[in-house]
Amino acid sequence: MSLSERKTIDLEQGWDFMHRGIMKLKNILEGLPEPQFSPEDYMMLYTTIYNMCTQKPPHDYSQHLYDKYKEAFEEYIVSTVLPSLREKHDEFMLRELVKRWANHKIMVRWLSRFFHYLDRYFIARRSLPPLNEVGLACFRDLVYKELHGKMRDAIISLIDQEREGEQIDRALLKNVLDIFVEIGMGKMDQYETDFEADMLKDTSAYYSRKASNWILEDSCPDYMLKAEECLRREKDRVAHYLHSSSEPKLLEKVQNELLSVYASQLLEKEHSGCHALLRDDKCEDLSRMFRLFSKIPRGLDPVSSIFKQHVTTEGMALVKHAEDAASNKKADKKDIVSTQDQVFVRKVIELHDKYLAYVNSCFQNHTLFHKALKEAFEVFCNKGVAGNSSAELLATFCDNILKKGGSEKLSDEAIEETLEKVVKLLAYISDKDLFAEFYRKKLARRLLFDKSANDDHERSILTKLKQQCGGQFTSKMEGMVTDLTLAKENQTSFEEYLNNNPNADPGIDLTVTVLTTGFWPSYKSFDLNLPAEMVKCVEVFKEFYQTKTKHRKLTWIYSLGTCNISGKFDPKTVELVVTTYQASALLLFNSSDRLSYSEIMTQLNLLDEDVIRLLHSLSCAKYKILLKEPNTKTISPTDYFEFNSKFTDKMRRIKIPLPPVDEKKKVIEDVDKDRRYAIDASIVRIMKSRKVLGYQNLVMECVEQLGRMFKPDVKAIKKRIEDLISRDYLERDKENPNMFKYLA
């Protein structure tokens, strides 16, 4: 049948047919006995709309049908849906609402299919809202707008019941909250404005009430357990029925009420706050504290501050304990004081191990806590104990571990581990250059007197120091270790030379260690008048060394030499292990029975202080090889000495030590001198690049540049600036005395 022959359907007749179809749909939705739509029913309804929309004007009823479509929903809502909702309250109203919303969506889906032709052509051409949207808007405007307040209150009431431990129908809440989201048709405005805002307000009020009671009743760990559990449950709520976008806002409210508001009260609780948890090693509680406070803005600041304070206090207690122990020992028990120093360093290492483990595990390696640990250790690690700087204590501690017969008896693994920890502590010491100098002095003694227990450990710590402080820090020390290896090869060559040249016979066994001046600490080298036997040795070695190199000058440091000589005493012969100085003095008595102080001094060509030391060691100390007149405990220039032929000892071999020289003063002087050069170099470097700079900025840049090795004193920098001005490296600005110019 052609379009012109098709029978025209008028509006009333057509709508009557459509109305019966809509009534059938309503009956199905209401659960009344009604057969389902067959495909034929559906086709008839669709075709009726199609025909009514494609008739020639004035019989094109598209606009009328579009309006009727909307009226069908409005009529159903007003007559059936709203009355059924108005008679119910709370949870029952919510259940009815969920049912009605589901039905409404079904009705929209079916009617949109019946009226589909409108969507395809009429609506598209006129830019009108699509049918689906019109259907949902009817529910929004008539049902949602009237009831959303009751819906919201009922949901919030159920949430609060659940918070109090009651069982609620979570699926119901999920379905109701989906209405808030779906009614927004792609936007979250309805959910956020009509529900979420009030729900968040209620959450704040709820947890505010709870927190105000808990903070009074509970200990800090108990309170945190409750807070963590509350946060877990709120997350759970989001997972089960709230929209996922609510999670950050909801948790922020809970964290604010439970943690932010009571942060300081909680952390400072008298017997259970952060201090107490640190004191009692409550790792689990500290981990929980970190987890909770890391979620609130700047929440970790007070925790890290308390951590820093606690570590500083513990460290200062160690310093005080070591000070007290040192002052309780009598001055003559030096060895006990040094073991106290060892104990102190060991305890500082243990303290660092303990709190570094806290930072790594409880505080999840957070930079704020690394910084707090560093700042705390910097406070007490730079205090020093009983007049000994931390730099010296650390160097002595290493010496004890690395030398033969040190007080620390450790396995190779334990030594490696301990050295690693010492190097970590060094990072907190401001005078790293002082440590380097003390360490170098002690390393020299270990290497030169064969006191080093293990070369591998010596090299290992140098590698660790190099990583921590840079190559410049360890270059001289590495040179010293290498020197010793070369010296051993040199000695082997010397022994071969002696075997191949029978004429070159030193007459006594001779071992010479050749060192490179620049690497080693500076030692006194005097023109000691050697006994003839020793002079011959020196000459033979010089001849050998000439065969190896022509361009190097040998400087003999007799103060570091040792000799084994036979003492022929009346009771028996005893082998004496002495220094080169002591041997030279004793050999004088082979040709004279009695010598005065001044004769000995003249014949040896030594200074007063050295003569006093060596004569004291031979006549006033444990082994009296020489007899002194008068027989007093001190050496004076009027004394006379003679060989003690009656001397004896139960040992066949004895070592006669020289009184130790206080090296500390020398080390500090050397370091001060090096610092002056370092400050000069830094100032010149800065001024060379800046050309003109103010005093304040120059000092700041200088402190920053040198800070890795030592903390330069501002007065010292000022002094060096003045010195550089006097030496024409810099000049003061004539207008502004606080400005300096670099003189190229």
Image: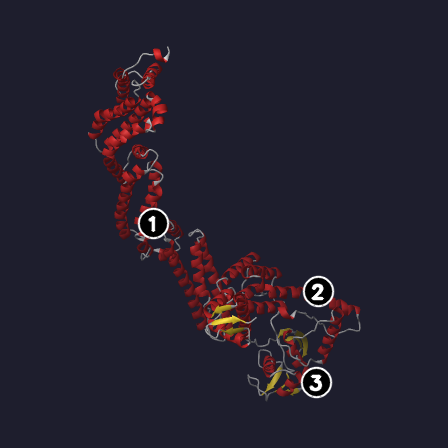
Which of the 4 image quadrants contains residue 493? bottom right
The numbered mark, 1 or 2, whose residue comes first in the sequence reads 1
Q: Give the vertical position of 171 relative to 65 (above or below).
A: below
Return the mark for residue 591.
Answer: 3
Height in image: 470 above or below 27?
Answer: below
| Residue type, label 1 | Met
Residue 570 visible within the image: no
Residue on which disc 1 sits? 224
The Cα–Cα distance between marks 3 and 1, rounded to whole angstroms, is 89 Å
Give the percent coordinates (x, y) of residue 386: 46, 71
Q: Quadrant of the N terminus?
A: top left
Q: Position of residue 358 (x, y in %)?
A: 43, 54
Q: Which mark sits nearer the N-terminus, 3 or 1?
A: 1
Tag 2 secondary structure: helix
Q: How many marks?
A: 3
Q: Residues within 10 Å of mark 3 (few under 14, many from 20)?
A: few
Alpha-carbon neighbours of circle 1 within 10 Å: few (<14), some, or many (≥20)?
many
Q: CA distance from mark 2 to mark 3?
A: 38 Å
Query: Residue 489 shows which numbered tag?
Result: 2
Q: Position of residue 186 (x, y in %)?
A: 35, 34
Which badge, 2 or 3, comes first in the chain's sequence? 2
Note whether 112 is above or below 239 in the view shown.
above
Q: Nearer the viewer, residue 520 or 297?
A: 297
137 lies above or below 452: above
Left or right: 432 in relation to 243: right
Residue kind at label 2, given as amino acid type: Glu
Residue 490 position within the rendered picture, expressed as x and y whole percent measured from the top left: 71, 67
Q: Please state which amino acid type lies under the numbered disc 3.
A: Ser
